[in-house]
Image (cartoon, rainbow, N blue to C red):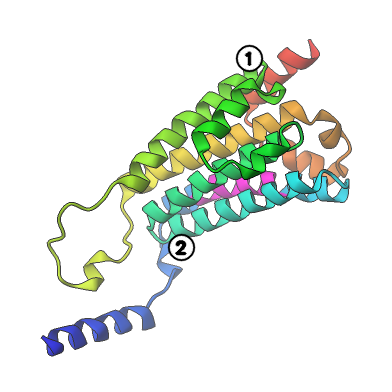
Amino acid sequence: MRDDIAKDKEALLSYLRNYSLTQILENEEKIQTLGSMHKKLFGLMTYTAELKKQKGNSLTLFYLSDMNSDLLLGLFNWIQGMDKPARLEMRCSIENFLKAILCCNKPEIIKEKAVHEIFNFAKADASFSSKFTKSKLEQIRNVYVELCKTVHNSISEIDSTSAIDLLPAYNKEQACRSKEFYIKITEAYLGVLYYNNVDVIASMHPKNYKLFMSTIARNAKKNVYSERFS
């Protein structure tokens, strides 16, 4: 028994010694997908940095920074084939995003732990009262439901007795699904920020303004312009 445990430990140590992310660079499809996910994250980071420069609400900045951290760690987990941890981080980012949006009008939201209650607050808040923002909130909620299914799913049967077989591995189908979740929520975040914070965006440094606007989906820009300015 001890020999089996020792052998598995040595196999695990060998795996860790040789662990490298450079193999990702050999997968052109994954690099392109990574680029599309990073672009959305970069837009959110740009907005957060600009809001800080413009001395925005400190609680909003706190939650937006946490959201960016969740998304970055989710992206890093996705890169390594760790889809379940990646989706867990995406789920955390949803809670932080909603609190970032709601905390100014509903300061009591910071103490709320139940995410379904946070969604209820959001549905009643002015930030999600327009046709556009309502659709984005629904998009976020739908992804949240799917993420919860993943996070709460348990392994019913484990055939292997080797730790190596349970370590992350790239699964194209799972990676594509995680990418879809990631893009949907980050596009929704960007859209809501764009709709509700025209003054902040208009006051951005010209370079950051162009960067931020380049990360907004074309149809979102069209819909926001239609609802707000026409």
Which mark is on residue 35? none
Main SS class of the magenta portion in the image: helix
Identified by mark 1, the residue type is Lys
- Which quadrant of the structure image shows residue 57? top right
- Which quadrant does the N terminus fall into? bottom left
- Which quadrant of the structure image shows residue 118? top right
What residue sits 51% from the left and 51% below the top? Answer: 34
Q: Look at discs 1 and 2 and give the one toward the viewer.
A: 1
Residue 149: image x %, image y %? Answer: 34, 40
Q: Which residue is mark 1?
A: 131
- Which quadrant does the C terminus fall into? top right
Q: CA distance from mark 1 to mark 2?
A: 41 Å
Q: Nearer the viewer, residue 219 or 149?
A: 149
Q: Which residue is mark 2?
A: 25
Q: Is residue 3 magenta?
A: no
Numbered range of the magenta stretch: 34-45
Q: Secondary structure at mark 2?
A: helix
N-terminal label among 1 and 2: 2
Residue 153 shows up from this direction: yes
Q: Secondary structure at mark 1?
A: helix
Q: Is residue 100 left or right of residue 205?
A: left
Residue 195: image x %, image y %? Answer: 73, 26
